[in-house]
Image: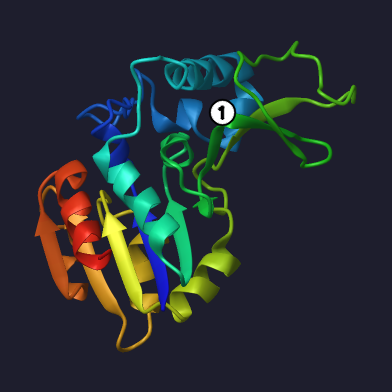
Amino acid sequence: MNIVVLTGAGISAESGIKTFRDENGLWEGHRVEEVATPEAFASNSKLVYDFYNLRRAQLLDPKLKPNDGHLALARLEAAFPGSFTLVTQNVDNLHERAGCKNVLHMHGELQKIRCLQSGECYQWTEELNEKTPHPKGLNSPLRPDIVWFGEIPKHLDQIEQDLLKADLFICAGTSGVVYPAAGFVQLTPRGCKKIEFNLEETPISRLFDETVLGETGKTLPDFVDSLIP
């Protein structure tokens, strides 16, 4: 049996991760075009660095911890003898901190930086700016390893391969409006059991066999309990 899980901002929000996006669509008072595009980085790298430094620093807050939803998925992976892939749209490290091993971050990771010259990524927990020394001494700029608007998400080939052979697809805490993730449910084969976990129904709820409403920190543990003897 093959299990594929897709998680979104909803599961991290239950741990207190700030979305940084308000009702007007602004990110910390900035338009998306100012802080989350390659063009923004080219025109005002300091603003972009500062924006992601704030987000990276939040992950070091000792009060920030994986919630019961994260822990339930880690428990499922540990107990399940088959193939288990967790695909997340989140850029935090809460799934790993909960104990998940096979995690694909399709939108990148806050605690990684990327060399613009080589494309190589490095673990990073400190502040980053235009004067940060290159980890390998290269004379090349460094950027957050985040997939910005207009860029192609990571791991899409592997994600598609796993979805095409999934027997169970779990979608937790996603809005159902951001593509390509919102289209993943349609890549699963006939016969695959598809279950959505969210606070409310989404535009893609009709594509699932079942939608479980409520906080994922409460609904996912109950579901995992039903799968694990």
Q: Is residue 18 visible?
A: yes
Please give the name of the residue rendered at 83% of the width and 37% of the height, measured from the top-left corner.
Answer: 117
Task: Judge from the rendering whether residue 206 lies leftward or rightward of residue 8; answer left or right.
Answer: left
Residue under the point 87% across and 26% down: 136
Residue depicted at x 23% and y 33% = 14
**Can you give x and y, in whole percent of width and height, for residue 206 in the image?**
15, 72
Tell me if residue 12 comes above or below residue 163 in the rendering: above
User: What is the three-letter code of the residue carrying label 1?
Assistant: Ala
Q: Residue furthest bottom?
A: 190
- Report the colour scheme: rainbow
Residue assigned mark 1? 40
Tell me: residue 134, above or below residue 156: above
Q: Residue 112: x percent and y percent?
A: 63, 32
Question: In the rendered image of this protein, does residue 205 appear above or below residue 17?
Answer: below
SS for callout 1: helix
Q: Position of residue 179 (x, y in %)?
A: 39, 58
The quadrant the N terminus occupies is: bottom left
- Disc 1 residue crowd, few under 14, some 14–19, many 20+, Cα 10 Å: some
Total number of numbered labels? 1
